Image (cartoon, helix red, strand yellow):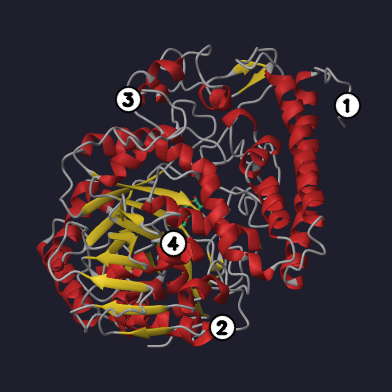
Amino acid sequence: MTVAMQTNLHPAWLPADAFRAIGSRRTVISATTSDSPLIDTVYAEVRAACYRFGGTVTRSSVDDDTDLMLRLTSEPGGLGDEGYSVGRADGITTVTADGPAGLLYGLFHLVRLGGSAFTGDPVTDDRATRTHRPAVRRRMLNHWDNVDVNPLMGQIERGYAGGSIFWRAGALTDDLDRLRTYARLLAATGINAITVNNVNVGRTEARLLTDRLDDVATIAAIFRAYGIALHLSVSFASPMVLGGPPTADPLDESVRAWWAATTARVYDAVPDFGGYVVKADSEGQPGPFAYGRSHADGANMLADALAPYGGVVHWRAFVYNHRQDWRDRSTDRARAAYDHFAPLDGQFHDNAILQVKYGPMDFQAREPVSPVIGAMPATRLAVELQVTQEYTGHQLHVCYLGPLWSEVLGFRFDGDGDGPFTGDAGSTVAGIAEHGGSLVAVSNVGDDPFWCGHPLAQANLYAFGRLAWEPAADPVVLLDEWISLTFPADTVDDPALVRGVLHAMMDGSWRTYERYTAPLGVGFMVRPADHYGPSVDGYEYTQWGTYHFADRDGVGVDRTRAAGTGFAGQYPKPWADVYESIADCPDELLLFFHHVPYGHVLRSGSTVIQHIYDTHFAGADEAATMREHWQRLADAGLDPALYARVADRLDEQVRSAREWRDQINTYFFRKSGVPDAHGRRIH
Ligand code: GCV
C-alpha cells in the first residue's frame, strides 16, 4: 500500500514534517506475521517518511546501524491487541507490541515524540520502557452523513464543513484517497471504530445493509488498513423497508431470522464488520415501542444477530417525547432517558452497548452529566460526545471542547471530589465506559479543505481521539500536542509565538463560549432548527421540552424532588442532595436545577442578574481579544489560506458574540427591570 497524502488538502496533524525524525533514521520492522494489513501500513508509513527524509527501512534484523526497531512479539507479552511499549537502550529506540494494531499506535506515538523519541538520559542515552494501552475498548466516531442529500438537513446532519467525504448526492464518493487520508489521521489519534451514515436512517441509507453492501465493503477496506472497524447506523424498521417481513417486532421469529440472515451477508462482505448503531423511538425513528416491546428486547435482537461474528450493537438512549405540550409542567425531557433505561439495567446482552449522551438534554455547552451513566452498573455503556459544533458555534466560533469533555469524563458519581480528573478511574464517567463500553463522538468532518470548516476545530477531533485513548490526559497538554504536530517548528517563523497565541485563544475558549451564550446551565437559547445564534424564547413555546421559564421575577427550571420535576433525584448521593439544594448547587448548573429570582446570590457572591450581565460583557470581550491574538500571527509564516480562513471566522465570532451579549442582556434587563451595576449599555 502507499501512504495517501493529498496536496490540495490541509494535512491537519500529520504534515510530512511530523515524520521527519523517523524518516531520517534507520528503521527495522521485525514482525513474524507478514500478512497483516496493519503491518503493511506501518511499513508503508515508515518507507514514505524515509523516501522524503533520507532514512531507510527494512524488514530484516537489527544491525549496528539501527536507530529504531518496531517489533511485534512472537508470544503475547501482556500488551493486549492495541497496547505497545516504547523504550531506548544501546542507541536503539524500540517499540514493542503484541498485535499489529499496537505497532501502528506505537508508530504514531513516536510521531508525537518527534526528535525526542531518539534521545534518552543525558548520560546513558537510555530511556526506561513505558507501556501504553487504551483505556477504552472502542473509540468511535459517528458520522451523521446522509447518502442522499436530505431536503432539510443536507448531506450531513449538523455538519459545518461542507459535504460528506463518504457520499455525494446518493453515490459513494470517488475520492477514496481522501478516505485513506482520513483513516490515517484518525488512527494517529487512537480512533478504532467509525460509522459512515446518519443515525436518522432514510430509505437510501437503509440499503447500505443490503444491496449497497459493496459501498460499505469499499470503505471498510480503506479503514481496515488503519485498524478502524466500520459500523453502520441501521433503521429498526429495516425488515419492513428492505423487503423482509411486514413487521419489525423484535420478538417475532421471522424478524429475528431476517436480521440473522442479513447480518450474515454483511459479514460475508466485511468479515471484520464492527456492528450496528441504532436510534430507535427517538425523534420519529421507528423502534420497539410500536410493538409493546422494551428497548432491551430491541437491542438484544440485534445483539443476537451480531454475536456469532463478535459484533456489537450501540443502542442509543436518546429517547424522549419530542411532541411535548409546553403547558405540561409534569413532563421533563431531562428525566426521559433515565426513566426509560435505568429500569432495564441488567437486561441487555453482553454485546449490546447502551450509548448515552453525556448530558440529559442534548450536547449543550453546559449540562450536568447524564444520571443514566451512573445508574446502570450491569450494562455496558458508551458515552456520546459531540465534536461537531451543533450547539457550540457551528465551527464558526473557536470553541476548544477538550476541557468540557475532560470534566465530563472525570465526573465521579460517588462524589469523591469533582476536581480535575487524576486518573483514578473509580466511578468516573470514563471508568464506567472502560468496563467493556465505548467512547463515541459525532464527527465534525466534511469535504472542506481544512476538514472541519474552521482550521482550529481540528483540535477538537484530535482531542477526542486522544481522550478516548487516555481519558485522564490533560486537555491543554493535548492541545499543545496538536499545536506541535499541526504547526511544526520548522515550518513557521516563530514557533513560540504561534504556540502562545493558540493557547491564549483556545485554552479557555469553551468557557468563553459559555459566558456569552445561555447562562448558568439553562441551555437552549439558540435559534430553533439550525441552532446557531441567540433566540432566547425561540424554543420556549415549542414541543421540544427545552424551556427556561423566565418571567419578570426569575428564571430556570425547577428540577428538584421537593417542588420540581424530581430530576435531581435521579442521581446517587451526594449529587442528588447537592443538585437539590439551591445553596450547594454549583453556580454553572444553577438554572438547570432551580428556578430562582434575579436577585438570588450565587456562590460566587454575585446576583444571578448581575452574573448574566457580567459574563456576557466579558464573553463578548474575550471573543474580540481572540481576534486580536490571531492578528499577531499575520506575519508568522502560516499558510495564508489558513490564516485568512481563521481570520474570517473570528470576524463572525466577534459579531455573533456581541449579538448574543446584546440579546441576552437586553432580554433579561427588560424582564427583570434590574439595571447593570456598572451602568454599561444595555439596549
Ligand atoms: C441526528 C439532536 C440533533 C439532531 C440529531 C439528534 C440525535 O436532536 O438536533 O439533528 O439527529 O440530536 O442525536 O439523534
SS under mark 2: loop
Label 3 vs label 2: CA separation?
48 Å
Residue at the disc numbered 4: 189
In-front residue for pair 385/222: 222
> Which mark sits nearer the N-terminus, 1 or 4?
4
Residue type at mark 1 is: Arg
Q: Nearer the viewer, mark 3 or mark 2?
A: 2
Is residue 168 placed above or below 278 in the rendered structure?
A: below
Which residue type does callout 4 highlight? Thr
Quarter occupied by the C terminus: top right
Residues at circles 1 and 4 in contact by the CB criterion of under 8 Å: no
Percent from the top left, x then y, of residue 126? 36, 58
Task: Residue under label 2, please give it.
Answer: 6
Secondary structure at badge 1 equals: loop
Comes first in the chain, label 1 or label 2: 2
Residue at figure coordinates x 53%, y 13% from the top left: 582
The residue that mark 1 highlights is: 680
Q: Nearer the viewer, residue 423 or 394?
A: 423
